[in-house]
Every structure is written in C-alpha cells, then in structure tokens.
Amino acid sequence: MSKLVLARILQGIPVLLIVVTATFFLVRAAPGGPFDAERSLPAEVVKNLEKRYNLDAPVLHQYVDYLGNLVRGDFGPSFRYPNRSVTELIRTGMPITFELAFYAIVVAVVVGVMSGLIAAVRPNSLQDYLPMSLAMTGICLPAFLLGPILVLIFGIWLEWLPVSGWGYSPGDKILPSVTLGSAYAAYIARLTRAGMLEVLSQDFIRTARAKGLSMPGVVFRHALRGGLAPVVAFSGPAVAGLLTGSFVVETIFQIPGLGRFYVQAAFNRDYTMIMGTTILLSCLIVILNIVVDILAVWMNPRLRKVR
Amino acid sequence: MPENMIDSLKSLEQIEFEEGRSLWNDAWVRLKRNRLAMFGLWVMLFLVSISLLTPWFAPYGYEIQDLELGASGPSLAHWLGTDTLGRDLLTRLMYGGRVSLLVGFAATAVSLAVGVIWGIVAGYMGGSVDAVMMRIVDILYALPFMIFVILLMVVFGQSFLLLFLAIGLVEWLTMARIVRGQVQALRRQEFVSAAIVTGLSSAQIMRRHILPNIMGPVIVYVTLTIPAVMLFEAFLSFLGLGVQPPQSSWGVLIATGVETMEEYPWLLIFPGLALSITLFALNFLGDGLRDALDPRSASGAGGVHE
C-alpha cells in the first residue's frame, strides 16, 4: 500500500511539471504583447513595464525564474491590478471557492447517495423511477441553466432567497451550493444505484439476509462499502468538474472566488493571473486525482494486485 | 459429392452471413423495445433534419430586426417571441442549434478519428508499442483539460475551428481506452489468427477485421460524447469564451437570455429547453444503445461528463 502511494506521488510530479511548462509557454506564445491592447504607450513606459514583469529576459530565463518563484509560492504581480500580486488575489479567492465546493459536495453526496440507495433497494418500482428520472433531469440541466432558473423562481418570483453574493445576507449560500452540486448529485445517484444493485445481488448479501438481518442493516453494514466504490472512483473527475463548474456558478451569483477571478482574467487578458489560476487549479486537480486513486484502492482491495 | 460440398459451403456462408447480421438485428429489436431510446432517436432525427433545412425553413432572416417591436412574448407571428432587438427567437434558435449540433458532431468526429486509430494500433500491436501509447494516454488523462481548453481559447482567440479541435482532442482519450480494451480481447480470437495466416498485413487486418467488430462500443461512446461536447461548448459560450457573435449557439442564447430573464423569461426558457431536450434525447439514446449492443453491461452513470 505505501509502495502504491509513493508510486502515485512520483507519477504526479512529471504531470505537474507538464502543467506548469505547457501553461507558461502557451501564454508566452499568445499573439500580441500584454500591453498593446490599449492605446500605445511611450517606449520608456513599455520598457519599464517589461522590466517589472520580467519580460525583457530571454524566454528560457523567464521560465526558470517563474518556476523558482512558483516553488516559493510567488505567482508574480497581476498585469491588470499592478498593485496586487496574483498570490494575494488567489489567497482571497481560494477559501471562498473551497467553501462553495465543499457545500456542493455535501449536497451532491447526501442527496445522491440517499436517492441512489432508495432506488436500488426496490428496483423497477416507483421508488426507483422517481429518483432516477430526477437524476436524469439533473444531468441534463447544466449549472448555467439551473442557476438562472433557481434565481428566477426562488430569488425573483418567490423572493425567498437572495439572488447573489456570498456571506452578505443569510441564505445566500444556498442557491449557489445547490446549483453547483445538483449535477453531481445526479451522477452519484446513478452510480450508487448501479453499484448497489451489483453488490446486493451477491451471495454474501443473501447470507446476511438469511441470518435474519434487516434490509437497512444489510445495506448499511455490508453492501455500502462495496456499492460506493464507483462513487469514489468518480469523485476525482467530479472535483475537477466542480472547480470548473465554479467558474459558471461564481459568475452567475457574483461570488468573489477563484473561478470568477479566472473568468475575469480571461476577459482582461491578465496573463499572470491566468497562469497563476490555471496552474493552481490544475495542480489541485492532479493532486486530488492521486488522492482519489489511492482511496479507491483502499476501498477495493482487489485492485491492489493489478498495478 | 462436390456438389454436396458446394451446397454445404453455401449454407455455411449463409449461416455466417445471417449471424453477422443478427447481432445488429438483435440490437435493433432490443432498441426498438426501449421507448425512451426510440424517443431520443426520433428527437435527434428531427433536430438534425431541421438543422439541415434551416436556411429554407426558418420563418425569418437570421439578422432581421424589428426595433419597434422589441422584445415580445410568443405570438402567432413569432411563435417563440422576439428578443430585445425584435429578432425572431425561433429563427435564432434554429440557427443556433445548427452551430451547437455542428460543434457536437465535429468535435466528436475528431475524437472518434484520433481515439479509434490510437486504440486499435495500441491494442493490436501490444507489447512496448502498447505500453508507450497507453502511458501517453495516462499522462494526458491526468491533465485538467477543461482548464487548458479555456486557456487555449483565451490565448489564441475564439476561433470556431480551434473550438471543436480543442474539445475533440480532449475527448479522444476515453475513446482510445475503450477501443484498446476491445481490441485486446479480439486479437486472441481465431478469425484474427486466420487472417494473419492468409498473409494479410497488420494494417489490413485492423481495417477489415478488427474495426467492424468494435463498432458497437464505439457507437455507444459516440452517442454519449456528443452531449458532453455540446454541454462543454454551451458552457464556454455562456462564459463568453466559446462561439462569438454574430454567430450564435444555444449557449450564447442562454447567456443573453439570462441578462434579461427578469423582464423576458422566455428568452432564457426556450433556448434552455432546446439544449435540455437535446441532452435528454442523446443520453437516453446512448443508454438504450448500450443496453441494446452490449446486454451484459449494466447501465452505469451514463453520460455527460467524465
């Protein structure tokens, strides 16, 4: 097991390096310099700016400098907000995005696992069809559609909940969390149902039932661990999806998180900011995928022999 | 005796022929029994034919404005209403649907081409070729591609070609994995050995004997990739990083609809319905095809995102 953990971590390092390198050179390859978007500046000013952003050095030199700074957690100054560093912007945005993602995961797991279980216990009954059709609806209603619809219904027509913001007024965290979490709740419901159906048809479940254990007892004591294995495997891609999903949700609800910074940086062509957020989000996703891989093996010992 | 042999050969040929067809026949029969999947199929046929005929069937011109009318709700003249510039929403929805579907199909075609070739070669060659090729897939798999596609769009401008090329190049990885797994299983079967003995080259065997036998899973995965791609395009367009005006797609229409949803909710609701119904149809069709073509596989989470 510890060998596997070590191997996974070692595999992650080249991937991280590829992420950083690809991002750096992609942004450097962008046609047009970062300063010729607006009115032309005097040559002196441009020179000073280039010096400040280390653009006058040879590209390879810039790359090495950037890597060195990254290791120290310094993403450089923002192009758009020269007085603030990218690190600073990230530090204000990250906790908010994490909090949002956390609530969304809670929504997704609680709603998803519960409805998956309910459906799997009595397959092909109303108890199965109802949650599963809801799940299909959740999959086909992307966040950028569901969010505005929820705002329209609960924010504007019913006036039950605030339509935007994060932590400014009570209840303003509910709509964003539900919006971000619902699609994943839907997937988790379907995965839980499929996984549980497979486990529940196995012999050891029949044995447990024959011993006189009640159905809820069997489900929670015996079946759940095996039945949730596909859900755990899914959580890696899900976290990646949640982070990219936060771009949309934070834009809709005007939440000052990392996702909104990223979208704004993309519009403003704030290159250092784009690089910083891309690298940060990518590294997060890579690391979380490694964690999920290890977790999946821990939950399903049969996988240990394969790799 | 020789005649007898010819007869039996003929009947053998017939049996083989019928067996070759019966897989697809069986699948079709199973699919037809699945009402949701058939509904999805009809919806998709309907949408595709409308998209093809849009230039002739659209009730109004794409850019025709009626500023005096402005935004109006559904009426007899404008079935789905008009937007703030007085443009007919149904017309714009039809033209936008063309773009959305085109991106969906084109990007899926890119992923199909790359993924199938990559998977067949890796699976058939095996050994170190396979190891290297799949290692590359593993490494690329670990990269957060969604973010990279956005980065690409930002850096190189939002060109249409780049959009579906980029999305297609993300989606081929899963296709390559699925195909490789199938090919590995096929390679050990007798008919492949027979083909090798008759002196066919590897390329010929891959094209004539392997390819037709992996069509089932490939079709299923294609049906599930199209909605994923359309969703991603709409996501990018919603953020303003995808399809750019004057071109429009359902994602663009949804994004503009959101801006005015308080006053003119139909500008959000109709494009949203169009996208949702299409995603529904494709997911149901994909699920149905999976059950029909590979009855053993349990239908899992299905669909849209990986």
Image (cartoon, coloured by chain):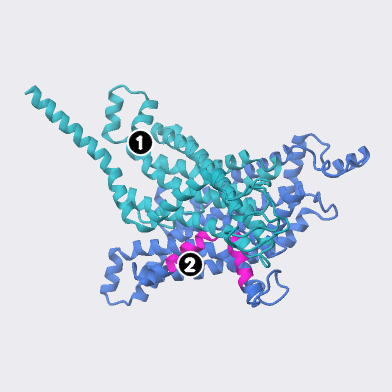
3D distance between C-alphas at marks 1 and 2: 38 Å
Depicted B19 relative to depicted A225: above or below = above
The numbered dot on residue A206 is none
Image hue for chain A? blue
Q: Is residue A128 left or right of residue A41?
A: left
Inspect the magenta stretch and tell me whether residue B244 lies in it: no
The spot of residue A233 in percent (x, y) is 47, 56
Q: Amino acid at mark 2?
A: Gly
Q: Nearer the viewer, mark 1 or mark 2?
A: 1
Which residue is pictured at 38% across the width and 30% down the height? B207
Q: Secondary structure at mark 2?
A: helix
Of the pair B203 and A221, the residue shown nearer to us: B203
Give the cyan chain's letter: B
Which residue is pictured at 47% across the width and 35% down the height? B118
- Residue tagged by mark 1? B212
The spot of residue B212 in percent (x, y) is 35, 36
Which residue is pictured at 52% across the width and 58% down the height? B276
Position of the N terminus of chain B, as image quadrant, is: top left
Give the magenta part as a residue range.
A131-153
- Residue tagged by mark 2? A112
Q: Is residue A247 visible?
A: no
Depicted B47 relative to depicted B272: above or below = above
Q: Is residue A254 visible?
A: yes
Q: Are marks 1 and 2 on the same chain?
A: no
